[in-house]
Amino acid sequence: MKTLRIGTGAGFAGDRIEPAVELARHGNLDYLVFECLAERTIALAQQAKMQNPQAGFDPLLERRMRAVLPVCYQNKTRIISNMGAANPEIAGQRTLEIARELGLQGLRIAIVCGDDVHDQIVHDKFALMETGQTLADLAKPVISANAYLGAGPIVRALADGADIVLTGRVADPAMFLAPLIHEFGWAMDDWQKLGRGTLVGHLLECGGQISGGYYADPGIKDVPDIANLGFPLAEVQENGNATITKVAGTGGVVSVATCSEQLLYEVHNPAAYLQPDVIADFSNVTMVQDGPDRVNISGGNGHARTGTLKVSVGYVDSFVGEGQISYAGANCVARGRLALDIVDQRLKMTGVNCLETRGDLIGLDAILGRYDGDTSQIPEIRARFVGRTATMADAKRIGEEVESLYLNGPAAGGGVTQSARQIVGIVSGLIDQSRVTPTITFLKA
């Protein structure tokens, strides 16, 4: 039975590069997939593109391509990635330039676009899932609107000979499902196999998260050599069953426990995981440890797709200002609380318009809420005051009030930091699949 080897080169935009190179070099891969788009990432990329038409793709694309292209070219490993973000065309051009600089002749780069549906929805009564309102009711400046494309355009690009496929917004598992459809010749309505391929994609999409990253809890769930965490790969059979593993000698662990945690990650209903290609059903999945760092996966299923695509809409929501200051030694908690009270009063006295505020003592109650127990043995705290505002000017005033605590607040404060930034909000809706038309263009090195 034919087996396809697919590895994960990144599970998010800022992921490490070295494990991807190791995987490309020693993973004996057919495909290396880089998943680099979180919910807000493409909205932030769109902002970058608006300021500079040559920007808007993944900031690490150039470093990643320089690192993995020579190895993938030598090993005939094809690359799929959503590092194109808001600007797949320029991402493709930069990849082409790097390939030529490296002397990698003949590489075919496919650029998948069509996910940007801003013009199609911004003027109609696009319904938002979170509130039931329309996009017009939101009454906020819309930065981006991108539909989650499925595997189809990537499959077509691979069939046309692409060595590298760069996309914008595509459903994460679809990037792993596409090579399975292409290589095994799966029908686009073979729901069981599409469900199983989506399961493989979901397990691989977060990279090191399935090989021990985000899993480690010292003394409870120990992960060996986690600083050298190896990224995962799947050995996928033609029937869609797979084995999850990693390169021998790398750090981390692949076990039924790590795979189970990843299976449930961001899944609301394991029996109905909605994707553009299929409604995947993970409810009867079986996992068996098949040796060190090897887990066999079987039993995934699927049902007919809904015919709609999720659209992620990014908008300018507000601004946030923040200031922090540290206090140490006896009575540090009381001095920290006094500092927060002073900032709160000063913002009101000086007319700073905050939509909401929050004061925390980091190390004491920043996560679980106010702590009123014994604080006599707390050696140090860091006071943090945060406020959400309608203007950048008001956001900056928050950090300024924290800094003024140096000479106008409790004793012995130090280490002030302050920041102010725009808040990009995300809402979602559904668009009929027939309204979205993916396009594919090719570049050749």
Image: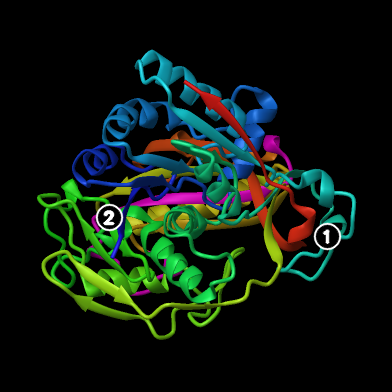
Q: Does the magenta stretch include residue 444?
A: no
Q: Seen in the image, is 307 located left or right of residue 264?
A: right
Q: Where is residue 50 in the image (x, y as percent from the top left)?
A: 70, 29
Magenta span of residues: 365-393
Q: Do the residues labelled 2 and 1 touch (CB within 8 Å)?
A: no
Q: Mark 1 points at which residue?
A: 126
**Marks 2 and 1, how far apart at CA:** 39 Å
Q: Position of residue 414 (x, y in %)?
A: 36, 38
Q: Is residue 185 visible?
A: yes
Nearer to me, 416 or 87: 87
Q: Name the residue under label 2.
A: 232
Q: Seen in the image, is 310 located left or right of residue 366?
A: right
Nearer-N-terminus badge (2/1)? 1
Q: What is the three-letter code of the residue carrying label 2?
A: Pro
Q: Position of residue 254 (x, y in %)?
A: 21, 64
- Tell me the residue at 58%/49% (across/down): 40
- Secondary structure beneath dot 1 equals loop
Nearer to me, 114 or 399: 114
Q: Quadrant of residue 191?
A: bottom right
Q: Can residue 396 be seen in this view?
A: no
- Tell me the residue at 80%/49% (across/down): 140
Q: Seen in the image, is 186 located left or right of residue 240?
A: right
- Tell me the residue at 22%/47% (across/down): 27
- Binning the other alpha carbons within 10 Å of mark 2 as few (below 14), some (14 to 19) or many (20 upward) gives many
Q: Residue furthest bottom?
A: 284
Q: What is the three-letter code of the residue carrying label 1?
A: Phe
- Residue 326 lies, with reference to residue 258, above or below; the image says above
- Tell me the residue at 46%/45% (across/down): 36
Nearer to me, 422 or 109: 109
